[in-house]
Amino acid sequence: MAVVAPVRPAQTRARPDRFARLLAAGLIDSFGMTLGWTVFSLLVLETGGLVHLGVCNAAMLVGVALSAPLTLWLSSRMDAARLLRSTTAVEAGLRVASFLLLLAGASVAVLAAVITLMYTAGLAAYAGMRAEVSAASRAGREGATMTLFVVALMAAEAAGVACAALLPGDPPGATGGLLAAVVAGYGISQLPTWLVARGARVARTARRAPTDPGRQAAPMLLAGALIMLLGSGPALLAVGLTAELHGSRWVAGSAVAFTAGTLLAPWAVALAERRLPTAVTWPAWGAGMLLGWIVAPSDVAGLLAAQVLAGLCVAAFEGGMDAHVAARAEGRLMGSLAASESVRALGGAVAVAALPPLVGTEGIATFSAAASAALLAAALVGMAVHRVPRLAARPPGTALALATAAAGSTTGHHLPARPTAGLIFDWRHVRMEPYGPPLPQPPDDWARMLKDARPHRGRSLRHWAAVALLLVAVGAAMFHVGQRSAPASPAGAQPVLPVPDPYSQQAPTTVVPLTAPPATAAAPRPRVLRLSTDNIGTEAHPNRVYLTPGQVDAAQAGKGRRPEFVVRPGEALRVRVANQDRYIHSFTFAKARVNLDIFEGTVGSATFKAPTAPGTYQFYCRYRKVGMSGTLVVRGPPAGGG
C-alpha cells in the first residue's frame, strides 16, 4: 500500500508567496464550486424533489470516501504537480457534464454516477492541495497554517452559497444566460488550481509492502462514522431543507450562519478537548449538530441558530477527530487522515440518502430531538466511564506539595516546595525568611520558563465574536436585498381574468375567482404538492398533461398515467404549478373552491385544505378538461387542526 506523506526537502525553506498562491487558488475554486453546486442542487430540488437531492448529496459523499484510496494509489505513481493537473482537469469536465445531463433530463442514477466520479477526483485534488500547504508552511506551524487554509475555504464556500441563493430566477440562477455563466464558472474555477500545480514541491511517495491496516484505529473510525450518520443529515441537507421550509432566498442566511459557527470551532475545541475525553466530546458534538434543528422548521431565527450551532459542532468534530487520529497515526499520517475523512463521508452519505425518504421535511424536528437525545445519552455514559480514572489520576508532585505545606504550617515556616520534574516553580513568590534554611537558587532563565509555562491564548473570544457578528450583519443585508428582489409568490388563489380559450370558438367568459378558506395563525405549515404542465405531443397533435416530479414523467403520461396525491382529511396543502407550455393552464379543484391560473412560462401556487371526508377527488385544467387532470386521495387519520 502506498502511504501519502508530504516530505519537505531539507535544503528548501517555506515561502510565504507559495502559500498565498495556494490560498488564492483554493478560494477561487471553493467559491466557484459551491456557487455552481448550490444552483445545481436547487434545480434538482425543483425537478425531482428532496429525495433526488438526497441521492445527489449521498453520491457526493460517496465520492469523498472513494477519494482516499484513489489518492493513495495516485500518490505512489505521480508527484503532486501531475496529480493536481490530472484530477482538476477531470473534475472540471465532470462539473460541466453534470449540468448538461441535468438539463437534458437524465435519470437520477446517471447524475449520481457523474457526481461520485466528480467528487472522487475533486477530493483527490484537495488532498494534493493540503499536502502542498503543509510543504509550504513554516517548520512547527503546519497545524496553524492548515487551520487558516481550511477556515478561509469555508468562508469562500459560504460566500458562494449565499451568492447563488440571491441570483435572480426561480429557482435562483436558472434563467438562460445566467445559467450558462454559472455553468462556465463552475468549470473554469478549477483553472487557478491547475496553474498553481506548476510549483508543486511534494514528490511521489515510495511504494511499500502492505502493512498492518491499523486495527487499533477501527473503533474510533467506526465511532466517527456513527456520529456522522446520526448527527450530520440536517446540516448536510441544509440547502434543500431551507428552501422547502422557508424559501430559497434564506439559503444564503443558512450558509452565513453555518460559517459563523465554524469560526467559533477552534475556541470550542481548545476549551472542550482540554477538559473532556473524546468519549464525551464526540457524541456531544454530534448532538450539537441536531439540537437547533428541533426548532428550525418553525421559525427563520431557529434555522439560523441551528446552522450556527451545526457549523460549530461539525467543524469541531472533524478537527477533533483528525487530531485524535493523527496523534495515533504512527508514521501513517496522510493515510490515517484520509481514512478519517472517508468514514465521515460514508456516514454522511448514508444520512443524506436515508433522511428524505424515511423522515422527510415534516419529521425533521422529531428526528433531531430523538437522535440528539441518544447522542447526549452516549456522552453521559462516556463521562461516567471516564470519571473514576480522571479522579484517580494525580499530577506528579501533588502529594509532595501537600506534605510540604503541612510541615510549614506546623513549624511556622512557609517554604516553597522544590520544583519537581515537569513543574515550573514561580520564584517571584519566595518569602525571605531570615531564620529559615537556605533557599534553592533560581535558574538563570526562570522568567522565560515561567512565561513558557503559562497557557498561550490565541485570538480572544471577543475577536471571534466580532467576526461572527460581522458575518451575520452581512448576511442580514444580503437577505434584505434578496427578499426585495425576489418575485412575489401568491399564497392563495389568484384572481381569474377573462382569457380566451385557444381551442374554443366561444367568446371569452369571466369566471368569478374562488378563494381558499383563510388559514388561522396556528395552522400547520402546508405540505407542498408539485406539478408541472407541458405538451408531450406536437403542435399539430398536442397532448397537454400534468406531470409530477418523481411520480409521473412524460413517458408515463403518454401512456395515460395521471398524477395522484394521497393526503389526510383536512391537511393543509400548497399546490405549486410550473407552466412549461406555450399556453395558459389552470389548477381547478372544485371541492376546495380553488381556481388557479398559470400563464405560460410562469409558476403559480395556491394554499387550501384537503376535504374532510375520505374519498377520491379530481382536479383538472379548466382550459383542457379532456385528458389534463389528476386525483387527490383523502384517507387516513385527520390532520391536526383539520
Image: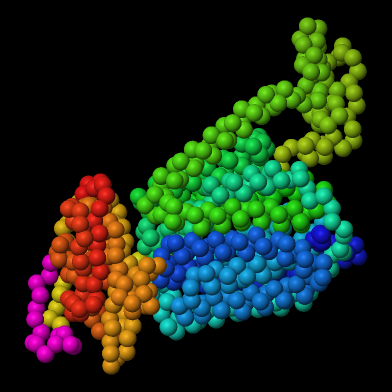
Asked whether the viewer can see residue 261, the reply is no
x, y percent for residue 631: 24, 65
Vertical order, 298 against 436 (above or below): below
User: What colour scheme does the image use?
Assistant: rainbow
Vertical order, 270 against 563 (above or below): above
Q: Nearer the viewer, residue 630 or 230?
A: 630
Task: Tell me the quarter of the image containing the N terminus.
Answer: bottom right
Q: Nearer the viewer, residue 209 or 258?
A: 209
Asked whether the viewer can see residue 411, the reply is yes
Span of residues in magenta: 500-514
State the image quarter where residue 498 is shown. Answer: bottom left
Q: Nearer the viewer, residue 159 or 509?
A: 509
Left or right of residue 75: residue 358: left
Q: Residue at x 44, y 75 (%)?
A: 173
State the image quarter where residue 243 is shown. Answer: bottom left
Q: Nearer the viewer, residue 375 or 478?
A: 375
Q: Residue at x 65, y 67 (%)?
A: 120
x, y percent for residue 521: 22, 50
State the image quarter where residue 69 is shown. Answer: bottom right
Vertical order, 103 against 373 (above or below): below
Left or right of residue 591: residue 542: right
Asked if residue 503 lies in the magenta stretch, the reply is yes
x, y percent for residue 452: 79, 40
- Tell me which secondary structure the magenta stretch mostly adopts: loop
x, y percent for residue 112: 55, 68
Q: Residue furthest front?
A: 559
